[in-house]
Each structure stands twice: as structure tokens, then as C-alpha cells.
Amino acid sequence: MRYNKNFIINFYFLTTVALSCGAEHNKKNDFYEIEEIKAVDYLRRIEYISPNTVAITGSCGLYILNLHEKDLECISKKNFCAKYIYEPILRINNEKVISCIDEQVMIYDTKTYKKKILNHKSVDLAIHPREKTIFLLHENRKVITTFNCISGITECIPTDETKCLCIDIHPKKEIMCRIYNANISFYPLNDLKKIIKTINFSEHDSTFCRYNTDGSFLAMGNKSSIYVINPDQETNDYQPIKQATQFEFFKKISFHPNGWLAILLRIEAPKEKAGNVIYYWDLKKKEFVYTMSALGEWYCKDFSFSQNGLDVVVALYNKCIRTRVPFAVDNAIKVLWRLNQLKAQEKISQDIVKYCFNLSLSRSSF
């Protein structure tokens, strides 16, 4: 069946220009559907494994939750349900689930269903993106142990004995970032006793840090303020991109697949005003470009994006909620509106409109 070439030109223009123009500033997601999924009590951590599967830690251990079937599989159960001695850690790397729960580190392979357990008291970890090696920060915050996921070899790495609150590894270079008190120090991975450079933040004491996907920026912060720095710039003059006010606490930072920094803020106000908000910061424009609210009033500790960037899951007290990331699909909706206009003008069938819209939606993935 042949169609007017004006339709093809219009559609091509929409999917190549409209989808690349980015989201409009200061929009909210209040009108997007939210799906609630019952999980386990006292949810602390959540991470996407696949489009319909997430790993979660609750009061009784580590679980795999199927978001489509609503099935909950227990991977590792604690002997008793209680508060954690240390804040749990949960990461995903090449379909492997890495969890640190109290005195135990577990690497669970979601393909082979095999478990590797290390008796290690870890307060933070970082994953080498190329060598498939996990760096574990000991509870004394000085000792770092590595575990190679392929060989299974564990090794204690000598350091300069400087304490640190959190660590991360550059995604492109052989560099580790270590933060303690008001200092950010960078070390070569082959010599953690040698400092490449140190950035001083005077009174700022970070408790979490993350490199973006290409390592050009480092986001860091604590419960009251968030910073974004360029590690290659020779300056100590950094100001927070956002500061919490009374009854507000930052809980997590992460990077959306499109490169924007996502910041989770918890509002501990009277019940009718309590809630959770995710702010999005454009690293290139250096401004906040989107806000996700309507994420429930229950206490929230964590969130995770799907690999294609279209969905986000948020961990609440005893359930998780899943919703669309608005700016990831807004442009596809604009395309649908224009397609319906073209349908009337060019006498295009509904099947063609549906096909073109699904194609534009798939291209809105990151």
C-alpha cells in the first residue's frame, strides 16, 4: 500500500527532531499512572535486573521480585527480622546481584542461580566496569578488599590508611575516588597509597558519591546538600546545586540513562505534607529540568531506572511503586498527536499510526 510522501517526510521529521529536542523544563509527572506492587516489610534497597525484574532488600534479607507476575523469590534470608547493623548495599553488574547485608557479601548470578558468599563487613562497594572486580570498603573505613567475579580470588589491597566514607571507580580510567570529611581524593587503582589529587570542600562531609557514565562528572553529597564537580578542573570553588530545607533529607543520587542526575528527596513534614520527590539535573545545562512527585507519602529509601530509561521503581515501606519517567515518553506522545493530525489529512490507517507511534516510543529509549 502506497502513502503520500508528505506523510513519510512528516514522520521522519518528528522522530528525528522532536525526539531529540529533550524534555521541557519544570514539568511534573502527577498525571502518570502509578502501579503499586506488594513486596516485603521495611524495604531498603531496590535495583532493576531486567525490564520486569528487580532485586530488593527488606527486613529479612535479599529477594527477587517479578514486577509483571508479582512473584517474590527469597534469595538470602536473615535468621531474624530486625534492623540492620549497617546500611544495606545493593548493586547490579552483568545480571549479577551484589548485596552487602550486615556481615555478609553475596554475589548472586541470575542466570546460573549460583551464590558466592563472602564473610566481610562492608560499608560501601565499587565495581570495576571492565575487570569484573568488586572493591569492598571494610567497616573500619581504611581497608579495601577486592573480589574477582571470574576467578573467585579475594585480595586485600594496601592503602594509605586514610579513612573514607564512600568510594567509586571511574568508568573509563583506572582511578578510584575516596571521600572522607571534607576531602575528595583520587588514587590510581594499582596503587591506593598514591594520591593523584585532592579537592577540599571545607565543611562539606559527603556520605555518597557517583561518577556519571563517562566519568566527566562526579556527583556527591549527604542528607543536606548535593554537589556536582568536574574532577579534571583545578578548583575548590564548588557550590551545592541543591540544599535541603527544614524537614527535608536527600536519600540517594543516581544517573538516568540519558545522563541526567537524579536526586531523591524525602520530606519529613506533617503527614498531609510528607512525601518523596525526584529532581533531575541536566549536567550540560547546569539546571534542574524535571521534577517527579506523587511518589507516595511512605518513607522512601531508594529508586532505580529500567535499562531503557522509560520506567522507575521506588522502594517504600512495604511495597514498591512503578511509573513512567515522564520526559522519556513525552516526546513520543507529541508524535502521536501529530500522527493523528496526519491521519485525517493523508487518510492513513490506524494500523500505520499505531506502528509509527510504537516506533517513536522505542526510539525514545536511551
Image (cartoon, rainbow, N blue to C red):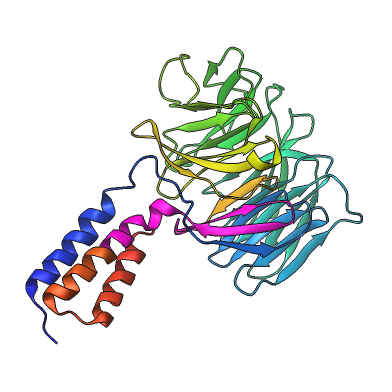
In the image, residue 311 lies in the stretch drawn in magenta: yes
Task: Give percent across and percent down for residue 290.
Answer: 42, 42
| Residue at the image point whose x is 31% and y is 47% from the top | 22
Q: Is residue 261 left or right of residue 55?
A: left
Q: Nearer the viewer, residue 79 or 216?
A: 79
Quadrant assignment for the C terminus: bottom left
Q: Is residue 157 left or right of residue 94?
A: right
Quadrant assignment for the N terminus: bottom left
Outermost residue toward the left in this view: 5
Q: Nearer the viewer, residue 266 or 8?
A: 266
Q: Nearer the viewer, residue 160 or 5?
A: 5
Q: Which residues are magenta?
A: 307-335
Give the quadrant of residue 205: top right
Task: Give percent across and percent down for residue 102.
Answer: 82, 45
Outermost residue toward the right in this view: 80
Is residue 144 depicted above or below 233 in this figure? Answer: below
Outermost residue toward the front in this view: 272
In the image, residue 5 lies in the stretch drawn in magenta: no
Residue 43 seen anywhere in this rendered image of the structure: yes
Q: Nearer the viewer, residue 10 or 197?
A: 10
Is residue 40 depicted above or below 112 in this figure? Answer: above
Task: Give percent across and percent down for residue 275.
Answer: 63, 43
Give the quadrant of residue 65: bottom right
Outermost residue toward the top in this view: 202
| Residue at the image point whose x is 58% and y is 36% from the top | 168
Q: Is residue 10 left or right of residue 248?
A: left
Residue 366 seen anywhere in this rendered image of the structure: no
Is residue 305 depicted above or below 88 in this figure? Answer: below
Q: Is residue 99 left or right of residue 80?
A: left
Task: Give percent across and percent down for residue 303.
Answer: 60, 49
